[in-house]
Structure formats: C-alpha cells, structure tokens
Amino acid sequence: MAETILSAEDVRAIADLARLELSDDDVARYQRQLSAILGYFQKLEELDTSRIDPTSSVLPLSSVMRADVAGAPLSVDEAIANAPDSDGEQFRVRAVLDR
C-alpha cells in the first residue's frame, strides 16, 4: 500500500474550497490527519468485495407514506373555511413589500 501524503498546497486548496483560513500549524496538522484518513481508505480498497451484493442501506426499508392518489379538489368555501382572513373567494394576507 502506497501511503498518500497530501502536500501543504493540497491542504490549502481544500481549505480554500471550504472557505477556511488556516494557520501554518493548522495546515501541518490537517496535512497529517487528512493523509491518515486517505490511508484508511486505501486499506478499505484492498478488501475483496466482489462477492458482496451492493446495498444502499443495511437496514430493511419500507415506505410509511400513503400512495399518492388524486382525489376530488376542495371547493372554494372549503379551501378558505379556516383562513384567518378572506375576501370572498381569496385569501387575504398582509403586505410583505414596502410599496
């Protein structure tokens, strides 16, 4: 396994993408830490997973949502029945713009 060592420039480029300002001490610390993390991923790549079925989750998934079935629309009276304020067939809301 070839150890991946990120350069200080790599760390600074990553920090720039994340909009982080790092001191020289931070760059050195993250250079070691990120290189170690990449090393762990290299170890994982060595595993033989050819006989393991791909999965998106190890948990059994089931939908708890009801089926999306079109129904009859509400009448205008039903739609505005619980409105705090209405004007005939429309909802009335206070202005949100200055003009």
Image (cartoon, rainbow, N blue to C red):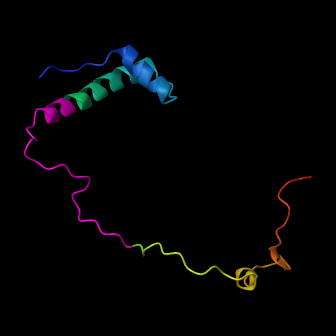
Residue drawn at point x = 25 percent, y = 19 percent: 5
Residue 22, compared with residue 99, is above or below; it is above
> At which x and y percent is residue 32?
28, 24
Predominant SS along the magenta part: loop
Q: In this view, which residue lies farthest toward the right?
A: 99
Q: Residue at x 71, y 83 (%)?
A: 75
The quarter in which the N terminus is drawn is top left
Residue in the picture at 55% in, 79% down: 71
x and y, in percent, of residue 42 in the image: 18, 29
Asked if the magenta segment contains residue 50, the reply would be yes
Residue 26: % across, % down: 40, 24
> Is 10 placed left or right of 46 in the picture?
right
The residue segment tinted magenta is 40-64
- 2 or 70, which is in the foreground? 70
Image: 81 above or below 25: below
Q: Is residue 41 above or below residue 32?
A: below
Residue 7 drawn at (x, y percent): 33, 15
Q: Is residue 34 left or right of residue 90?
A: left
- Front residue of this view, candidates 12 and 71: 71
